[in-house]
Image (cartoon, rainbow, N blue to C red):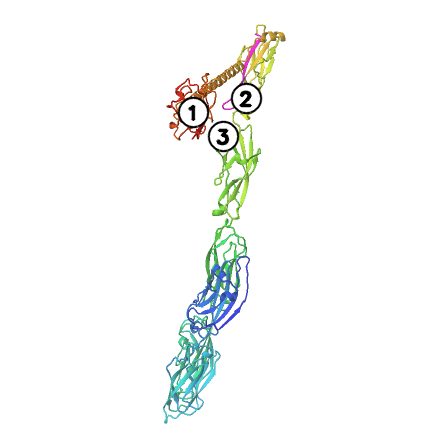
Amino acid sequence: MAVITIRRQVLALMSFLCFCSVTGQVSYSIPEEMPKGSFVGDIAQDLGLDVKRLKSGKARIYTGDSAEYIELNKERGVLLIKDRIDREAICAKTAPCALHFQVILENPMEFYSITVEVTDVNDNAPIFKRGEMKFRISESAVVGTIFVLEQAIDLDVGLNGLQSYLLKPTDNFVLKLQNQADGSKMVEMVLQKPLDREKTDHLSLVLTAIDGGEPQLSGAVQIHVNVLDSNDNPPVFTQKIYKSTLRENSPPGTIVITVSASDLDEGSYAKITYEILNSVDGASEIFDINGETGEVKLVGNTDFEKKRQYQIHVQASDEGGLTDSSKVTVEILDTNDNVPAINVMSKSSLITEDVQPGTVVTIVNIQDPDSGENGKVQCDINNNIPFSVSSTSTNFFSIVTDSELDRERASEYNITVTCSDEGVPSLSSSVTLTLQISDVNDNEPVFERSSYEAYIVENNTPGVSVFTVRATDADWNQNARVSYILEDSSVNGEPVSSYVSISADSGVIHAVRSFDYEQIKDFHFRVKAQDGGSPPLSSNVTVKIMIQDQNDNPPQVLYPVQTGGSVVAEMVPRSADVGYLVTKVVAVDVDSGQNAWLSYKLQKATDRALFEVGSQNGEIRTIRQVSDKDAVKQRLSVIVEDNGQPSRSATVIVNVAVADSFPEVLSEFSDFPHDKEYNDNLTFYLVLALAVVSFLFITCLVVIISVKIYRWRQSRILYHSNLPVIPYYPPRYSDTLGTTGTLQHVYNYEVCRTTDSRKSDCKFGRGGSQNVLIMDPSCSGTMQRMQSEKSILDEPDSPLEVRAFDIII
């Protein structure tokens, strides 16, 4: 790994409030011409960064408009050679030569300045532009006459650059080197021995330029000297050094300066010719001189940003071969001819709205090659946006937030960065950056109203839609998705969820039950609207449900009280005048509003001409004078009706006795029949009791008969079975055949059965009068039947009595 030296300097550390923009500098030194992939430096270690940070921060190299010779390996955190580096192509004669670039990281935004110094290797030999140099020198030239030689060019610098010259042979001439202000050396050939044309009219010399590198390289050029006849006086310049200024970008043909030389000779030896000698900085290609007048003109292009000064070596020679030299120094003046170049180093195309003021959004690098005031650049951005621009370091500007962002007010910003220099006239350039503001969940849902009231008619169908609440969220996407939740509460001791429900998506409130206005007239609960953000935000609102009355209750008569068996009558004296208050029907309706407005009407009456009912108050009054002809017993039927739609009513019977004394009333009402409704109810209950008793009797009868039939069927099944039965007698038993016709002892029988009930058998031995069963006490318990078998059941008069069975399955 061809790293010569590594120098690191952390120059500055700057941080911002949210995204930290850090500036620092690390320097490395490498030789030129290193192969691709060569190691330059461990940037992660030298900057104190973790390799993971390079990956997560999307580390990259920013070089502006210059070529990228160095690459970053994020996996290892090192800098490598990306392309061949030729120091001479990059920096020419400038020393030291360095590559400047930045390493950019994001999230948070950071950038580091990296300087890689490219050191010279001796890969260029000194060369002379002309293959040979020719001089015509008069034999009369005096010892010490100086002849300026062309300088060699060596693209290397330092010790690898041009160090010395060697002239051979040195019989007539020696070399003289003069140091120049720009560090170069003027090569002069000095005549040290007079020339003699008669001996030698032509001399050949070799000038060798040698550098100081390792290995040492050199270049040579032939010098041809023609010796001329005598010429007494050489040309002499009026000045050894001429100075002039020239603005860059001046058009070709511009006169830079005029040089002048004089010769004391006469005739052809006094005729002077001017020429520009080749120089290291290429001045001979940019400037030209009039050979006769000495006027120096511009023939090429000058650029202050590339070269600020030229050294022009001018030589004057006469016809006799004598020469003199002078130097013209041309200073190039800067003009404001370069527009500031805006390079976006790193930018965030999307930031969240909750970033803090001072957050770095974009870093731009400004390049203006002009100098002085022409190279000073100030940047600004458009107004009325929550951003500002600030200079973080030389030629670097940061676009930062200067106030809080709100995506709900502006979801996108177009930031126009304008950079202007201070030249006259000022030049500027601009670039527009589009910045998207991403949403954060910073807005809670807002209901359309501060509270809601809804109405529902009682006796509703469960599940019916009552009302819809709606909330909106100013956020975006998932953060704006609103869900509705019924908050836990109770109504009359029951959870509110047993009264209403709400759709989580639409906010539609449904009735869970059927409401009864007479039980509950209104209730309230709270609905919460919650968004889908993380963490979620919510708000709530109070909803009041009011039950509307429906005419579902008839009027109830409170007076006169209706009794089932007794007769209640109102007494009216025969002396009662018109308008006499007999009684008042009092009724109520548990409904409300117009559904509870009651009106009274006389439906039936024994004598309609005698009584009337107040339609509003239910008062029964006489409408004429009571006379002796009026019957004692008066029966009035009053209907009480509400005002609902449809209306409901109740009827009350009012008995009125027209009499002056109580005994008279008793005698008349003693034969009053009982109420028909009471009699009807009594008859109904009597019939019902008779029906129940009859039903129970028939049921018991059916059960008894069923049991009898069941038992008979069981006995018949046992009677018809064919299973053999082997009687078992106790030891020493003998049949005495008594005269009573019945057996005096108990028989034990063994019943043999199979799994198939149809093959089971139960058989008995015959009676003692026909069969004799002999029991041998010594036998093992097996009885031999003496006669043919016959079922005992075949003889209904058999005196056998069965007491027990042992059943073998």
**Placement of the C terminus among the 4 image quadrants:** top left
Report x, y in % for residue 768: 42, 20
Report x, y in % for residue 91: 45, 72
Q: Could you say which quadrant of the image residue 282 lies in?
A: bottom left
Q: Is residue 90 above or below residue 412?
A: below
Check residue 643 for magenta coloring.
Answer: yes
Check residue 266 for magenta coloring.
Answer: no
355 on left or right of 290: right
Q: Could you say which quadrant of the image residue 715 lies in?
A: top left
Report x, y in % for residue 87: 44, 73
Asked if residue 167 shows in the view, the reply is: yes
Report x, y in % for residue 591: 55, 25
311 on left or right of 357: left
**Circle 1 SS class:** loop
**Circle 1: residue type:** Ile
Asked if residue 341 shows in the view, the reply is: no
324 on left or right of 491: left
Q: Which of marks 1 and 3 precedes in the sequence?
A: 3
How far apart are the alpha carbons under marks 3 and 2? 22 Å
The residue labelled by disc 1 is 774
The residue labelled by disc 2 is 555
Q: What residue range appears in magenta?
A: 631-651
Select label 1 or label 2 by which is in front: 1
**Circle 2: residue type:** Pro
The residue labelled by disc 3 is 460
